[in-house]
Image (spheres, rainbow, N blue to C red):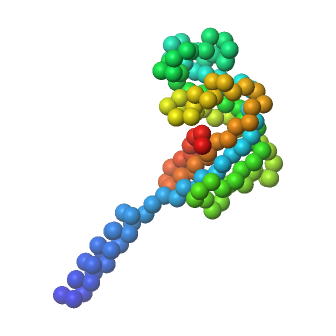
Amino acid sequence: MKNKIRLLVLFIIFSFCTCCFASYENRCLLTGKLLEDPIIASSSSDHSKVIGESTPTSPQKIKNFQLKIWVTESEIAGRADSGCQLTNNQPYELSVTLPATLINAYKLTKATKDHSISLLHTIIEDDDHNEQYTLP
């Protein structure tokens, strides 16, 4: 009877430990310059418009911002142990699409080529290895 109880307790502990396994996040602050003006994709038309060419006037019409960035710096931002160094310690080009639902995203409507920009890069190391970019 004691062995059955021990086995049951071990099974419960093992089940609890595997259910509580959390994914790990690396957060890095990327800094660089825009290689071109941000492209604004709006919901009022089926194609994207470059800033200055009939930019939507109301925030509800903007869907997302497409950016090309020359990343020159990468540093730990919050919880991160690895993955925040530049690839081969060299600057690199990054293309990213940011949803207009981000709180700070509308600052990008005034951004132009060579504008300095920072992005928060979050790498979620789980089964899917998700990555996301946001504005700090």
Quarter of the figure with residue 21: bottom left
Q: In the rendered view, does 90 fall on the left or right side of 22? A: right
**Percent position of residue 100, x then y:** 53, 29
69 relative to 63, above or below: below
In the displayed orientation, state which residue is furthest to the left: 1
Q: In screen coordinates, is 3 left or right of 117? A: left
User: Residue 94 sits in which quadrant?
Assistant: top right
**Is residue 64 in view?**
yes
Q: Taking 38 as reference, is 125 above or below it?
A: below
**Direction bottom: furthest residue:** 2
Of the 4 image quadrants, the one containing the C terminus is: top right
Q: Is residue 46 visible?
A: no
Name the residue at 64% across, 42% down: 119
- Looking at the image, residue 48 sits to the left or right of residue 18; the answer is right
Q: 81 or 5, which is in the foreground?
A: 81
How many numbered discs, if any?
Answer: 0
Residue 75: % across, % down? 70, 53
Q: Residue at x 56, y 15 (%)?
A: 56
Q: Residue 68: horizontal and vertical position, in percent?
A: 71, 32
Q: Residue at x 49, y 54 (%)?
A: 127
Residue 54 in picture, x, y percent from top left:
62, 10
Q: Residue at position x 27%, y 78% from top? A: 9
Q: Compared to 54, does 71 lie above or below?
A: below
Q: Quadrant of residue 48?
A: top right
Measured along the vertical axis of the image, is residue 87 above or below residue 93?
below
Q: Quadrant of the N terminus?
A: bottom left
